[in-house]
Image: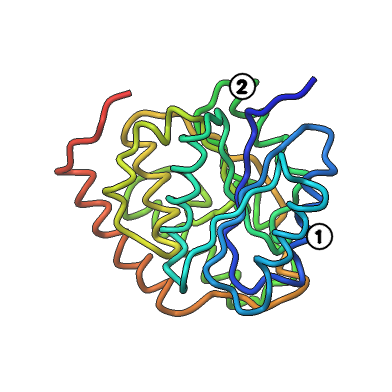
Amino acid sequence: MYDKRQYSYHPTYNEKENMEKIVRAVFGLEKCFHILVIDDGSPDGTAQIVHRLMDTEFADRLFIIERKGKLGLGTAYIAGFKWALEHGYDYIFEMDADFSHDPNDLPRLYAATHDEGYDVAVGSRYVSGVNVVNWPIGRVLMSYFASKYVRIVTGFHVHDTTAGFVCYRRRVLETIPLAEVRFKGYAFQIEMKYTAHKIGFRIKEVPVVFVNRREGTSKMSGGIFSEAFFGVMRLRLDGWFRKYPKI
């Protein structure tokens, strides 16, 4: 039976090596998902690949938003959230398009929200040890201790706060004031989870294995981690003084 409630989206920039493969992998799952690709003017032809797949095979399941220039990861996520809410989706996923997030884990995140009743399901690299493959050891340590740092500063007990593989129930994104989200880089991921927690939504970490991208180049930069480092302090201050919405 056809079910339109599951929707995942992929912010992309120069992902031509992975785009068609990730689309076919998601659409090859037993459960029916829709995909929205948000492309920030990739010069490598990523958007053209998506349009070809839309025109020839997946017109009713594959969608794209094209933006001019690199406008930031956080703004891409918010554009996807708003699109999903406007189009009536009940379970909204975010994931990378480079296979660092395994499409086979999508049904597990869905089950945590739909079947177990959680409001947010986080595909977590650190809830059951360190489940990262093919990352340089410096990058692993930076990511792991960044999450430790967030837990210490904020008192927020999620092991993988910077994870970008997440399922939100619709009511979470309807309640969080998306227009007030500040951060654009990895701090965006921390801010969304922390805000959901402060509002009172239930969060579950689902253990996943994160595999470093097979093809293409990473978009990571020092500025992204710098924003996250100082952004956490600001979130802690928010936790003391900000009035959060009620469920």
* Above or below, comparing residue 125 to residue 169 in the picture: below
Q: Secondary structure at mark 2?
A: loop
Residue 148 appears left or right of 41 = left
Task: In the displayed orientation, state which residue is furthest to the left.
Answer: 241
Residue at left offset 63%, top offset 49%: 63
Foreground: 130 or 192? 192
Q: Nearer the viewer, mark 1 or mark 2?
A: 1
Q: Which residue is mark 1?
A: 21
Q: Amino acid at mark 1?
A: Lys
Q: Whole-Å distance between the Cαs marked 1 and 2? A: 30 Å
Query: Which is nearer the N-term, disc 1 or disc 2?
Result: 1
Q: Amino acid at mark 2?
A: Glu
Residue 22 appears left or right of 65 = right
Q: Position of residue 50 (x, y in %)?
A: 71, 59
Task: In the displayed orientation, state which residue is furthest to the front.
Answer: 55
Residue 213 appears left or right of 40 = right
Q: Residues within 10 Å of mark 2 (few under 14, many from 20)?
A: few
Q: Locate the C terminus by quadrant.
A: top left
* Above or below, comparing residue 101 to residue 139 in the picture: above
Q: Mark on residue 116?
A: 2
* Above or below, comparing residue 203 to residue 76 in the picture: above
* Above or below, comparing residue 149 to residue 193 in the picture: below
Residue at left offset 62%, top offset 23%: 114
Residue 38 appears left or right of 100 = left
Residue at left offset 32%, top offset 32%: 199
Foreground: 40 or 220? 40
Tag 1 and tag 2, C-beta contact below 8 Å: no
Foreground: 28 or 56? 56
Residue at left offset 48%, top offset 53%: 77
Q: Locate the N terminus by quadrant.
A: top right
